[in-house]
Image (cartoon, rainbow, N blue to C red):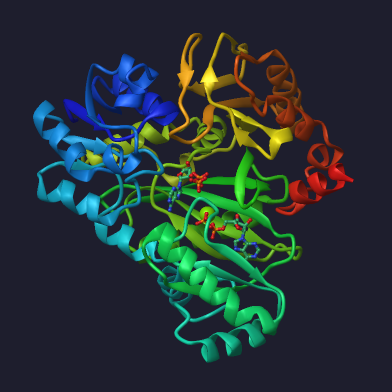
Amino acid sequence: MFKKILIANRGEIAVRIIRACRELGVRSVAVYSTADKTCLHAQIADESVCIGPPATKDSYLNMNAVIQAALNTGAEAIHPGFGFLSENAEFAQLCEKSGIVFIGPSYKSIEMLGDKAAAKETMAAAGVPVIPGSKGAVRSIADAKEVAEKCGYPILVKASAGGGGRGIRRVDSPEDLETQIIAAQQEAKNFFGDDTVYIEKFLVDPHHVEIQIMADTQGNYIYLGERDCSMQRRNQKVLEESPSPIVSAKLRERMGKAAVTAAKECGYYNAGTIEFLVDANRDFYFMEMNTRIQVEHPVTEAVTGFDLVKAQIEVAAGMPLHITQDDVKITGHAIECRINAENPSLNFRPSPGTINALYVPGGPGIRIDGAVYQGYTITPYYDSMISKLIVHGADRNEAIRKMRWALSEFIVDGVDTNIDFQLEIIKRPEFISGNYDNGFLTRYMEEKKK
Ligand code: ADP
Ligand code: ADP
Ligand code: MG
């Protein structure tokens, strides 16, 4: 096992990783920007290193500063968390060159899967069902027209390097195709520094269901059930649950096996997530693979009792998985609500400021993965997610009841949050029945406006 790990992230995920280090008896090194000196992760790690000014490109995305901090503190490995450098193949390779273990898959896997258009081709060749669309990237407008015609409108133009729900455009008719592709390429260039786009059939009101996999460097693979992430706003997840209310044991097994096939195809190791869309016929299609730990990993941990972050570190240290597929059992039901400092009635505008009072819920089956404390000042520089509330119940109804009362107890004073909005969602009959798709939240908010 490693003696010391550097965590190249901030906020709740950095705190989560520091806690895993403690359980494993590993020393932790936090990095922080000058805006984050008072952040929880910088306070509770065994050591903390300032790596630059607030702008992410100068601190959390500054590869050399992060590597230098690891070398200076004698950290043997770097955990990248999610976002920031976590899916950056160049960074993973730089770690290797510097003699530091990157806690994640090989840079080759990251490279292969980070190009979403190419990844779909790889999966299709391996026999994993993919969403119909262009074979790889769009090469010309004529080519795009043909593909779109074949798929049937509406279609989506997606940035091959995209992520975080950005770089996705819907095209409803052939007249708009050319202008939308050009705009999408421009946008992709600006956001991701890569103007490659691909076309996908727009599936009407599907469900987002993803499979968590874990693999060691000895070639053992397991899948740990699914997460339903259909509660989305602007293609971004708001609330997640496991198991999915629409997935049967049989479908779980089929999707799990497809996910393992997908991972094996890329020589994948460490934690990864294969995202699928599931349509009304309960047919599933590969969408993309995320080569990192995900925001919503705690719901999987709750129902499987498997600590994904500890396993990531163990696997990176060369240890084999300590369980096999037969040991994976799904117990009860878990739900996660993302708690953001934002104002839902002002179009979810971020709400930086000082937290004057904070009361977090507790009790059986309640987990908080947070990074804020009373007196902490949320700065405007980073993501607005300040905490995650995760509940685990014997069944879905119990989990919903727990979430309802936990949200009602949660007090954050001084900044606006989406707590009441989450409460509104979990009280909706569509959610309670489990019968909601990716389009639900958008339709619901449109209706509320009227
Ligand atoms: P998850 O699937 O784990 O929910 P998200 O897609 O919501 O992941 O992304 C996790 C975090 O990483 C979010 O804070 C998101 O804004 C950020 N993120 C993901 N991909 C990118 C990207 N390509 N560029 C910038 N930020 C990203
Ligand atoms: P990102 O890399 O930003 O996470 P994804 O490709 O995973 O992008 O798509 C994000 C979300 O956009 C999905 O969860 C889904 O809600 C929606 N989406 C993506 N592709 C399609 C599609 N072909 N049809 C319908 N919805 C889609
Ligand atoms: Mg995605």
Q: Point out the image quarter for the N terminus.
A: top left
Q: Which residue does the image show at 54% across and 71% down from the upper left? A: 183
Measured from the top left, where is residue 260 in percent x and y? 44, 58
Q: Nearer the viewer, residue 151 or 101?
A: 151
Q: Is residue 207 above or below residue 124?
A: above
In this rendering, position of residue 76 left or right of residue 111: left
Residue 10 visible somewhere in the drawing: yes
Tally of numbered tags? 0
Classify residue 348 by image quadrant.
Answer: top right
Q: Nearer the viewer, residue 350 or 159?
A: 350
Measured from the top left, where is residue 33 in percent x and y? 30, 29
In this rendering, position of residue 145 left or right of residue 426: left
Q: Nearer the viewer, residue 347 or 237?
A: 347
Q: Is residue 205 above or below residue 391?
A: below
Q: Which residue does the image show at 29% across and 35% down from the upper left? A: 8
Residue 267 visible somewhere in the drawing: no
Q: Nearer the viewer, residue 397 or 207?
A: 207
Measured from the top left, where is residue 194 in percent x and y? 38, 66
Measured from the top left, where is residue 242 in percent x and y? 62, 39
In this rendering, position of residue 338 left or right of residue 198: right
Q: Which residue does the image show at 44% across and 75% down from the upper left? A: 121
Q: Is residue 19 above or below residue 138?
A: above
Classify residue 110 by image quadrant.
Answer: bottom left
